[in-house]
Amino acid sequence: MQNRKAILKAGACAGFVGATAFTVHAVFTSTSSTAAIGLIFIPIYGFPAAGAGWALVYTIFALLDLSSGRSSWKSKNVRFAAVFLGAFSVAGLSFFVQQSALSVAKNPAATPQELEEISQRWIPWGRREVDIALAQHPSTPSAILETLVESGDEAMVQHVGANASTPLAILEKIAAGPLTYERVAGLAGNRNISRAIMGKLIAATASDANVADSVRQGLYKTYVLAALAANAALPQDLFDRLVAIDSPTHFLVLALINALNVNCAQVTHLLASGLAMKTPAYTIPS
């Protein structure tokens, strides 16, 4: 019994360590600037994984007792093992179905027909990750992209907007909706957007929603306008409007300075704007 308790604890520890290793790997292989926040999920994922590790070892012991005749089908430990195995099988099947669909959705060589079949497949768990991969795929049929835009998921809309294969009609549909940084950051970097869309994205900086919330306005400049500044299809006159925007954020200044169509006078102006952001304002005492 003492040996079993030790092994059960070892199973729980193995589950926790496995979840921790998975989380740390995901954080350090991510390209997101906020990936480090994922470390706070270690206990959130670790403790359930520890419980699963403990339950797996307990189930193995229960099955061994059943096979040796020390337990019957009516015993509590065998019933627990049966429930756990059932739940584990359902979870495993759901994971397999999701990974199978995801492997197709992330395959650059996947055909539109295969992607359409994936979009209609029953996926009990992880559907959103598959939809994001479909939103990013260059061969996804336009009907699926339009459905993803209509889902209301802002991150989904952002990925569809960033897809270079998204038809202009769908890009215009995105631009006709709320111009928040969560929705249109991808749209701003797409070289296929029209001049009218570019103008709307610039004008949205002064929208009521952004003006009323300085934090949201700063995020809009950082994610949307910086992406637009880096867009090689941006006409010179619209680029000049970006340079003239008041209170540019640090990342917007960097994007403008590194753009191919910036001139020396604009660089000087932008560097002065960047210096003003770093210099605290104060008054000379009389």
Image (cartoon, rainbow, N blue to C red):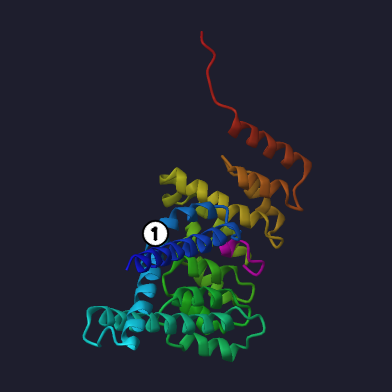
Quick check: can you spot residue 185?
Answer: no
Task: Identify the residue at image location x=39%, y=59%.
Answer: 44
- The image quadrant of residue 273 is top right
Residue 186 falls inside the magenta stretch: yes
Task: Identify the residue at image location x=64%, y=72%.
Answer: 164
Task: Identify the residue at image location x=76%, y=52%.
Answer: 261
Quick check: can you spot residue 173?
Answer: yes
- The image quadrant of residue 276 is top right
Q: Position of residue 34 (x, y in %)?
A: 53, 53
Q: Viewer-proximal residue, 274 or 65? A: 65
229 w.r.t. 233: above or below: above
Task: Identify the residue at image location x=52%, y=83%.
Answer: 101
State the extent of the magenta-drawn residues as a range.
185-193
Q: Residues within 10 Å of mark 1 (few under 14, many from 20)?
A: few
Label 1: which secondary element: helix
Q: Position of residue 125 (x, y in %)?
A: 41, 78
Q: Position of residue 198 (x, y in %)?
A: 60, 60
9 w.r.t. 145: above or below: above
Does residue 283 appear to the left or right of 274 in the view shown?
left
149 w.r.t. 96: above or below: above
Residue positioned most to the top: 286
- The image quadrant of residue 51 is bottom left
Q: Viewer-proximal residue, 102 or 179? A: 102
Q: Which residue is mark 1?
A: 44
Q: Viewer-proximal residue, 229 or 88? A: 88
Residue 32 falls inside the magenta stretch: no
Does residue 80 appear to the left or right of 157 in the view shown?
left
Given the image, on which type of amino acid does mark 1 rest? Ile
